[in-house]
Image (cartoon, coloured by chain):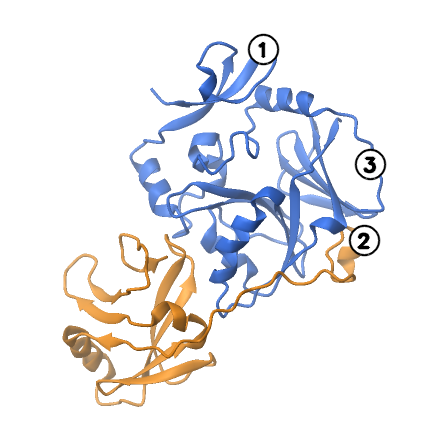
Chain colours: A blue, B orange
Amino acid sequence: MPRVAYNDAALTIWTGGDSLKLIEGLSTNKMTDLAKGEVRQTIFTTTSAKIIDIATVYHMGDFLAVQTHKSCLEQLLSQVLPKILDQDVNIRDVTDMNSFLIEYQLEYENVGHFTSNSGTTQAFIAHGLSFIVSTLDVVHQIDGSVEEFNEWRIQNLIPWIHHEISSKNHPLAVGLSNFVHPDKGCYVGQEVLARMISRKRQGKRLTRVVNGEVDEKFISTQGKTHSLAIVRQN
Amino acid sequence: MVCAIIMDCGTCETAGPVQVMTPEVVDVNLSISSKAQEMLSDAFGDDRSMALLVGVLSGGCSGYMYDLQIVEETDQSCQEIKVDGFRVLVPNSSSHLLDGIEIDYVDRLMGGGFKINNPNAESSCGCGESFS
């Protein structure tokens, strides 16, 4: 299956008994029931429900490995760190000690779980998509291109950081409603998202369009014949 | 460490912790409205050895949530304030968020109960339990 480098990935290690509870309170998905060996994505949002970053959380047993993005890490930590207060949470940034890859077009997978061996952890994120985190001494073959990966994303309507997933958008507008838990209780941005869901007014939505079908200003990922666009719902 | 064979978690190397800027502990001033005092008197009865713990938790729609409890003691590092005869405990870790608050009581069928009026809050959610 094709593999491409995931150069913007960041990895932080969260230790302490309150780590999952802290993430639960600051992001959109249900996290407190995440078990060892499972991986789950959740979205950190602002009080106005705009996206700060999407996080992929690996439950490693003694700690959580939280994969986010280098370009968003400063803002994410400025949201998270003041909220630790008295809680048992410690965070270390180990981004520079690991390498990151994306593997896609997978046919057989165990979505929501990860496997680990020989310095490499592979998480199965969604249908056909996985993330690989490795120690720096592991050498991987990179045989895919960003253009091909984007074509695959367009085909499968998969949003990506700084294309669809950005601070301009809320999770529902970019096809991330699977990671917005409907009844987990309060979290930052929940009021806004709950109102959108209950009133069935999500504003914009992610859609695949034939090139030229919509104005270029709505295009979030440009493909050869089709593109991803975020357009207002009729 | 188990993690070393699956990814580099940094525990075996020298990855330092992300620096948390711990806010300065503030000597908290707070007030309790007369209606809130009435309700606290009902809750405490004659036993004023109990204390009202006014804390802050992470979460809620705006990032922080108020946490009110009646306790005898707490393990948290707190400052104890006497307000109108009531013992009030405020955790030092959240003192910067609670200085200047007024504890009020709103008497209505829906959304009633103890309310915190907080001059430090830039915004708060509809139910009033959460602020940022």
**Disc with the residue nearer the chain's start (1 vs 3):** 3
The front one of A137 and A121 is: A137
Please tell me the numbered disc located at residue A78: none
Question: For the residues marked 2 and 3, what is the alpha-carbon distance in whole angstroms?
Answer: 16 Å
Q: Would you identify the image quadrant in which residue B40 lies?
A: bottom left
Asked if residue A150 lies left or right of residue A134, the reply is: left
**Circle 2: residue type:** Ile
The chain ID associated with circle 2 is: B
Rendering coords of residue B95 (x, y %): 39, 73
Q: Residues within 10 Å of mark 3 (few under 14, many from 20)?
A: some
**Residue type pointed to by label 3:** His
Placement of the C terminus of chain B among the 4 image quadrants? bottom left
For label 2, count other residues whose C-alpha is less than 10 Å away and answer few (under 14), some (14-19) or many (20+): some
Image quadrant assignment for residue B56: bottom left
Q: Is residue B25 visible?
A: yes
Q: What is the secondary structure assignment of the residue under circle 1?
A: loop
Q: Residue at x 53, y 65 (%)?
A: B21
- Residue B67 location (% of width, % of height): 36, 68
Distance between the alpha carbons at the discs numbered 1 and 3 = 31 Å
The residue under label 1 is: A225
Residue B28 vs A121, above or below: the answer is below
The residue that mark 3 highlights is A140
Where disc 3 sits, the SS reads loop
* Rendering coords of residue A72 (x, y %): 56, 44
Question: Looking at the rendered structure, which numbered label has been put on residue B5?
Answer: 2
Residue A206 screen position, x and y as percent: 46, 25
In the image, residue A199 sits, relative to residue B6, either above or below, namely above
Query: What type is the residue that disc 1 sits on?
Result: Thr
Marks 2, 3: nearer the viewer: 3
Report the label total.
3
Asked if marks 1 and 3 touch (Cβ < 8 Å), the reply is no
